[in-house]
Image: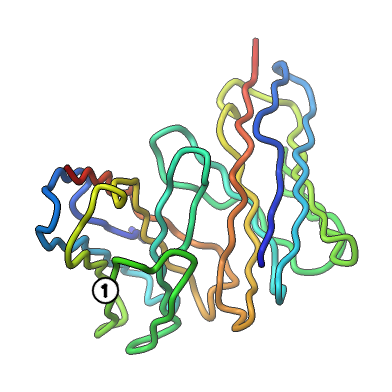
């Protein structure tokens, strides 16, 4: 089966750095996504990794190790508006057409 | 403006009364999919489509039907809704075979009583 694990909750303070980890076991792999979802809203795209290594995009970076089935999302200079759920998702499956989501990590940023 | 439009945003219905949730995208995307989101379970894929007339089951297809007669539209049909289909539903589209950024609709909150 498909298994994507990420912590349920994390807290941090404004200005800090936080790392949200994601481990996965899926049949077939064609990329890993991170999405941000504020309460009651639709998910929005943050990053995509298909090769090993670090992708940096402003305050957000994402890392992938395919051999370890591991990714993390790094958020720097945290702001209150970063309080949201962060969703790890793997594109794969036997037909390489499926998108599997983890249950999300609820991040709370305190002043 | 590039967008995915779902309708309705909110719906309360009774058990057994057929309903359709519409989804339309204006980005000429090949890949479209439907998800349901339940507390503690995250987003689960119901059905997906890689192109016109090509659809396939996701994790939780039971009780749902879809069709993809045109590229822009991907309606979700509940032939006989039951209370366990009460959920928040999202439609999404992405370019190519799906391994690209997904654009989500605003969501449909469905309650079946």
Where, by quadrant of the figure, is residue A107 drawn?
top right
Give the chain letter at badge 1: B
Q: Residue furthest right?
A: A67
Q: Compared with residue A6, is residue A15 higher up or lower down, i.e. above or below?
A: above
x then y, percent, for residue B95: 49, 74
Say which element carries label 1: loop
As rendered, which of A58 and A52 lies closer to the eye? A52
Where, by quadrant of the figure, is residue B64 drawn?
bottom left
Direction from residue A43 to residue A111 in the image, left or right: right
Mark 1 surroundings: few (<14), some (14-19) or many (≥20) residues within 10 A: some
Where does the C terminus of chain A fall, quadrant-wise?
Answer: top right
x then y, percent, for residue B44: 48, 57
Direction from residue B85 to residue A63 in the image, left or right: right
x then y, percent, for residue A58: 72, 42
x then y, percent, for residue B63: 29, 66
Q: Compared with residue B55, is residue A91 higher up or lower down, i.e. above or below?
A: above
Where does the N terminus of chain A fall, quadrant-wise?
Answer: bottom right
Where, by quadrant of the figure, is residue B69 drawn?
bottom left
Q: Residue at x 29, y 81 (%)?
A: B68
Q: Compared with residue B85, is residue B72 higher up or lower down, i.e. above or below?
A: below
Q: Residue at x 56, y 26 (%)?
A: A81
Direction from residue A72 to residue B4 in the image, left or right: left
Q: Residue at x 56, y 78 (%)?
A: A97
Q: Residue at x 43, y 74 (%)?
A: B48
Q: Compared with residue B52, is residue B14 higher up or lower down, i.e. above or below?
A: above
Residue on which the image places disc 1: B73
């Amino acid at each position: 089966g498909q298994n994507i694990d990420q912590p349920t909750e994390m807290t941090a303070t404004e200005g800090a750095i936080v790392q949200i980890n994601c481990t996965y076991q899926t049949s077939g792999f064609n990329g890993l996504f991170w999405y941000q979802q504020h309460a009651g809203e639709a998910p929005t795209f943050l990053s995509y990794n298909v090769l090993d290594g670090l992708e940096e995009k402003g305050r957000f970076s994402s890392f992938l190790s395919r051999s370890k089935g591991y990714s993390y999302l790094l958020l720097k200079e945290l702001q209150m508006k970063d309080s949201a759920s962060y969703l790890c998702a793997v594109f794969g499956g036997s037909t390489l057409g499926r998108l599997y989501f983890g249950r999300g990590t609820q991040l709370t940023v305190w002043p | 403006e590039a967008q995915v439009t779902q309708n309705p945003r909110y719906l309360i219905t009774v058990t057994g009364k057929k309903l359709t949730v519409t989804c339309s995208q204006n980005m000429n995307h090949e890949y479209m999919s439907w998800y349901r989101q339940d507390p503690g379970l995250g987003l689960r894929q119901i059905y997906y489509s890689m192109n016109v007339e090509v659809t396939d089951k996701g994790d939780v297809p039971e009780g749902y039907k879809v069709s993809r007669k045109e590229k822009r539209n991907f309606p979700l049909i509940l032939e006989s809704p039951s209370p366990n289909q009460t959920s928040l539903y999202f439609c999404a589209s992405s370019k190519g075979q799906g391994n690209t950024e997904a654009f989500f609709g605003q969501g449909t909150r469905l309650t079946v009583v």
